[in-house]
């Protein structure tokens, strides 16, 4: 699983994989929208940050995404 990637310097949106319930919450709150190829409810596009507060929030989401991917990959390797 690829947890996150940036969509370029001009766009700055970020594709994240995050738990489906968290993805739904972020979309409901206007921070993100479902990715066009979302198959599992965990793939979202997060808008590029515009200020320091948004930057810190998005960096936190990236950390969540990496943490979730790390947990899932560890679980899969134990099966």
Image (tube, grey):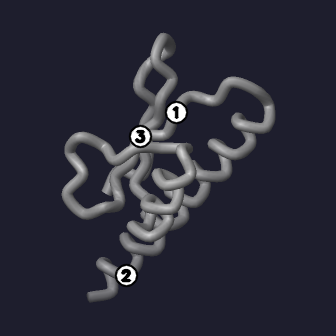
User: In the picture provided, is 20 more to the left or to the right than 59?
Assistant: left
Q: Earlier in the sequence, mark 2 or mark 3?
A: 3
Secondary structure at numbered mark 1: loop
What residue sits 35% from the left and 60% below the top? Answer: 42
User: In the picture provided, is 51 more to the left or to the right than 12?
Assistant: right
**Mark 1 touching mark 3, by CB under 8 A?**
yes
Q: Nearer the viewer, mark 2 or mark 3?
A: 3
**Mark 2 touching mark 1, by CB under 8 A?**
no
Secondary structure at numbered mark 2: helix
- In the picture of the structure, the residue carrying the numbered disc 3 is 45
> Is 51 located above or below residue 73 in the figure?
above
Q: Nearer the viewer, mark 2 or mark 1?
A: 1
**Mark-to-mark CA distance, 2 and 1:** 30 Å
- Using the rendered view, name the quadrant where residue 33 is placed: top left
What residue sits 45% from the left and 59% below the top? Answer: 23
What residue sits 31% from the left and 43% below the top? Answer: 35
Q: Position of residue 51 (x, y in %)?
A: 75, 26
Disc 2: CA contacts within 10 A as few (<14), some (14-19) or many (>=20)? few
- In the picture of the structure, the residue carrying the numbered disc 1 is 47
**Mark-to-mark CA distance, 2 and 3:** 25 Å
> Is 4 located above or below residue 14 in the figure?
below
- In the picture of the structure, the residue carrying the numbered disc 2 is 75
Q: Earlier in the sequence, mark 2 or mark 1?
A: 1
> Is 43 located above or below residue 50 in the figure?
below
* Quadrant where the image shows the N terminus: bottom left
Q: Position of residue 60 (x, y in %)?
A: 67, 51
Give whichever of 57, 64 is nearer the camera. 57
Q: Position of residue 10 (x, y in %)?
A: 48, 11
User: In the picture provided, is 47 more to the left or to the right than 69?
Assistant: right
Secondary structure at numbered mark 3: strand
């Amino acid at each position: 699983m690829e947890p996150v990637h940036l969509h370029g310097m001009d766009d700055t949106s970020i594709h994240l994989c995050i738990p489906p319930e968290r993805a739904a919450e972020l979309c409901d709150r206007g921070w993100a929208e479902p990715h066009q190829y979302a198959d599992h409810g965990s793939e979202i596009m997060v808008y590029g940050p515009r200020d320091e507060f948004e930057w810190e929030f998005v960096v936190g989401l990236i950390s969540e995404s990496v943490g979730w991917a790390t947990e899932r990959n560890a679980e899969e390797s134990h099966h």
